[in-house]
């Protein structure tokens, strides 16, 4: 609990000492006693957290003293303590900014104690919120959370800065593990909407039958089991940002409903007939080529253009050059610090090994590789501590020295076998059209 500095302004010496003694029983309170209003005003530079102000002072009225205090420190709570009960005076003082008005009697010190406790709680809450705000700002500062100095990542920084200048929809693309949600959070927490919620939802993780109620909410009785009203993510994120990850996997029928919300800026809960306005910034992300999904008829063209907004493409780690080493060093130091371990450096051989790998899992995979290396290494991290789980598989595959066409056929046959001969599913996973697979199968025969 933080210390609370309290000014007690009281010309009655005995009564003032009683209040000071009573309030000082809490060791978190620092109580300073003044006999006149002038003494109080001259010491406001000490920035008290609360002032208990006698209404009848020998040099200045409590009302005048209150006005002087509020002129310089409008947020400073001032409790007026008066020897007489005057409803009109109390109302006037409260209107002038007094926190409360107490009449001097045997219960005054207890009422003052309770008021101080409430102010202490408010101060603690304000401090927690300020600490949280600073932590969020520190955590999501662009160049602190996104490590690297490559031209590709500098272009991402530039686009992120531009994203802060308006509420334009943001579409983030990139392979799995490149940090799409991290970028979305950084944009939100550095924007004018930072004090409002950031809500993320993975579209592919929610069944098509539930996605509508998840986004728009529902009324009580909308369906069996709807015992209470539930607000959807659009409402919960109103004033803030809604992040829709894996947007390409959204059901085609749901896409039409999302388009309407973006056009009308209002939602309708399931089972309801009231249009509810929402002010929600939308950031979407996908590891697929949305324009290709449109061509294949899996994504609405009108929604595609609506969502495109400001596109930000996150480059794969293999295209970021020395950023690999910058990230590896950062992850190693972070992991060592979190686990009470000594910092460990990468040898030249380890660095060379890291730079030669393709990282299909991108940054997420690099983090796992580095954390394991820190655990395995006694001192410096050498090449034998760098383990790539898929290296052997790739080496064996490429070691067959087939032609490109033969490699393609092997990959297609692998997916067809994996999905029990389902050409549509295999084509979807490979990101090609069915005709491509049929053509290659025909050429094979």
Image: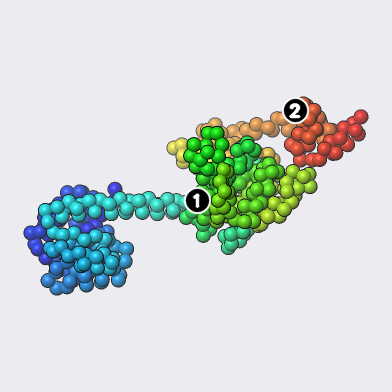
Numbered circle sitting on residue 418: 2
In the rendered image, residue 426, in percent from the top left (x then y), is placed at 77, 34
Label 2 neighbour load within 10 Å: few <14, some 14-19, many 20+: few
* Quarter of the view holding residue 391: top right
Numbered circle sitting on residue 268: none
**Image point (17%, 71%), residue name:** 61
Which residue is nearer to you in this view: 296 or 92? Answer: 92
Which residue is label 1 attached to?
197
- Return the residue found at the far left: 14
Please state if 195 lies on the left or on the right of 311 as rendered. left
**Image point (71%, 51%), residue name:** 304
Mark 2 or mark 1: which is in front?
A: 1
In the rendered image, residue 255, in percent from the top left (x then y), is placed at 68, 46
Please state if 410 lies on the left or on the right of 348 as rendered. right
* Quarter of the view holding residue 318: top right
**Image point (8%, 62%), residue name:** 13
State the quadrant of the C terminus.
Answer: top right
* Quarter of the view holding residue 78: bottom left
Q: Is residue 199 above or below residue 340?
A: below
Q: Is residue 397 above or below residue 292?
A: above
Q: CA distance from mark 2 to mark 1?
A: 41 Å
Q: Is residue 87 above or below residue 305?
A: below
Can see residue 418? yes
Labels 2 & 1 near each other (Cβ < 8 A) = no
Which residue is nearer to you in this view: 225 or 305? Answer: 225
In the rendered image, residue 45, in percent from the top left (x then y), is placed at 26, 66
């Amino acid at each position: 609990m933080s210390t609370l500095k309290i000014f007690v302004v009281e010309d009655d010496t005995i009564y003032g000492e009683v209040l000071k003694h009573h309030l000082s029983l809490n060791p978190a309170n620092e109580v300073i006693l003044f006999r006149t209003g002038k003494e109080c005003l001259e010491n406001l530079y000490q920035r008290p957290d609360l002032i208990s102000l006698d209404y009848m002072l020998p040099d200045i009225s409590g009302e005048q003293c209150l006005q002087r205090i509020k002129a310089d420190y409008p947020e400073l709570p001032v409790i007026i303590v008066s020897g007489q009960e005057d409803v009109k005076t109390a109302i006037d003082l409260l209107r002038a900014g007094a926190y409360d008005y107490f009449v001097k009697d045997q219960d005054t010190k207890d009422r003052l104690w309770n008021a101080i406790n409430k102010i202490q709680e408010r101060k603690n809450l304000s401090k927690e919120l300020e600490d949280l705000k600073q932590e969020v700002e520190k955590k999501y500062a662009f160049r602190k959370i996104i490590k690297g100095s490559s031209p590709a990542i500098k272009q991402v920084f530039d686009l992120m800065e531009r994203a802060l200048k308006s509420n334009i929809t943001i579409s983030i693309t990139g392979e799995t593990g490149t940090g799409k949600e991290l970028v979305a959070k950084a944009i939100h927490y550095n924007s004018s909407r930072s004090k409002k919620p950031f809500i993320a939802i993975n579209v592919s993780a929610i069944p098509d039958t539930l996605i509508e109620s998840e986004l728009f909410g529902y009324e009580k009785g909308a369906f069996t089991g709807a015992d209470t009203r539930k607000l959807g993510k659009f409402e919960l994120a109103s004033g803030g940002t809604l992040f829709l990850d894996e947007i390409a996997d959204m059901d085609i029928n749901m896409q039409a409903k999302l388009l309407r919300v973006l056009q009308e800026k209002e939602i309708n809960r399931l089972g309801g007939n009231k249009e509810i306005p929402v002010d929600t910034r939308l950031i979407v992300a996908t590891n697929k080529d949305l324009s290709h999904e449109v061509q294949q008829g899996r994504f609405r063209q009108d929604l595609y253009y609506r969502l495109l907004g400001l596109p930000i493409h996150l480059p794969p780690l293999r295209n970021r050059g020395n950023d690999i080493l910058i990230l590896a060093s950062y992850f190693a130091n972070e992991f060592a610090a979190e686990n009470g371990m000594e910092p460990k450096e990468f040898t030249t051989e380890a660095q060379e090994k890291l730079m030669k790998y393709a990282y299909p899992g991108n940054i997420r995979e690099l983090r796992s590789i580095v954390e394991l290396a820190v655990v395995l290494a006694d001192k410096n991290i050498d090449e034998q501590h760098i383990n790539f789980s898929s290296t052997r598989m790739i080496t064996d595959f490429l070691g067959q020295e087939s032609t490109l066409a033969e490699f393609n056929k092997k990959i297609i046959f692998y997916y067809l076998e994996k999905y029990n001969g389902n050409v549509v599913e295999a084509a979807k996973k490979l990101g090609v059209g069915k005709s491509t697979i049929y053509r290659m199968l025909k050429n094979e025969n």
